[in-house]
Image: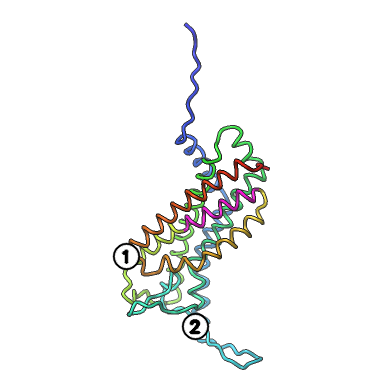
Amino acid sequence: MENSVKFEQSTFGKRLKSMLKVDFRRMFKSRLFYILIACALLVPIVMVVMMTMMDGSVSVDPQTGVETVMQGPENAWQSIGTLPTEDGAAMGGMDVMAMCNINMAFMGVAVFVCLFISDDFRSGYAKNLFTVRSKKGDYVISKTLAGFVCVALMLIAYFIGAMLGGAISGLSFELAGGLTAANIVFCMLAKIFLMLVFVSIFTLISVVAKQRAWLAICGSLGGGMLLFMMVSMITPLESTIMNVFLCIAGGAMFAFGLGAISNVVLKKTSLV
C-alpha cells in the first residue's frame, strides 16, 4: 500500500488567522503599545486639571498691552467634543478644548502603525514572511485590523482619562443642550469606526516608506492633519446612529480602497 502525502490547502481564512495571531501577539507584547495606552489615559487627566487651575488667569501682551483671560473647561464632556447649546448651535468656538480633545488620538496611532510596519521591513521579517507563507493582501489586512484595535483601545483609555480628569477637577457632568447618554455612546462609536480611515491611510504611507520610519511618521501626521478638522464635524458630541453608520461605511470603503492600493504597492516595489 503506497503512502500518500497530503498537503493542507492554505486558504485565505487560515492565512489571515495566522497573520492576525502573530500581529496581535506582537502588539500586546510591544512596549510602545502600552506607552501609547498610558499616554492616552494620562494626557486628558493632566490637561483638564492644568487648564482648570489656569482658569481666570490673565496674560498681557507686552507690545500691545492686550489682556487675554484664560478660560478653562466647565464641563467634563468638553474633552470629548464641543458642547451644543439649547438652540442646537455649537458652543465654545475654536477654543483650546475644541482643538485638544479626544481626536488627538490619531497622532498616537500614526506613530504605532508606522513603527509597527517599518520594524517588519527593517528587520527583514516582512521579506521572509512573504517568501515563506503569507500573501501581501493578508499582511495589509492584518496590519489595518491591528491598528484599528490599537486606536479603539486608545480612544477608550482617553475617555476614561477625561472622565477621571473631570472628576478630579470638580467639573460638571451635566448633559446640557439636549445632550443624552445615547449621544455620548454614538459619538464614541462613530469616532472609533472613523479612525479606520486614518489607520488605512497610515498603513498605505507606511508600506510606501517601508523601513524609513521617520518618513512614514511625517507623511502620516501630515496626511492626518488634512482630515483632522473633519473628525469633529463628522462625529460631534451629539452624534446619532446615523453618524455611526456613516463612519462605518466610510471606514470600510477607505479600508478596502486604500488596502487594495497598499497591496499593489507591495507587489510592485522592492521589499528592502
Q: Report the front residue among 201 and 164.
A: 201
**Residue drawn at (63%, 92%), measured in percent from left and top?**
64
**Residue drawn at (45%, 36%), measured in percent from left and top?**
13
Compared to residue 210, the image places residue 195 above or below, namely below
Total labels drawn: 2
Does the magenta stretch mainly form a helix, a strand or a loop? Answer: helix
Q: How many angstroms separate mark 2 from mark 1 (CA)?
A: 28 Å
Counting other residues with Cα less than 10 Å from the Cα at mark 1, is it few (<14), some (14-19), or many (20 or more)?
A: few
Counting other residues with Cα less than 10 Å from the Cα at mark 2, is it few (<14), some (14-19), or many (20 or more)?
A: some
| Helix, strand or loop status at disc 1 | helix
Compared to residue 13, the image places residue 71 above or below, namely below
**Residue drawn at (47%, 27%), measured in percent from left and top?**
9
Determine the residue located farthest toward the bottom in the rendered image: 65
Q: Which residues are magenta?
A: 195-210
The residue pinned by badge 1 equals 182
The residue pinned by badge 2 equals 71
> Does the magenta-highlighted stretch encompass residue 169?
no
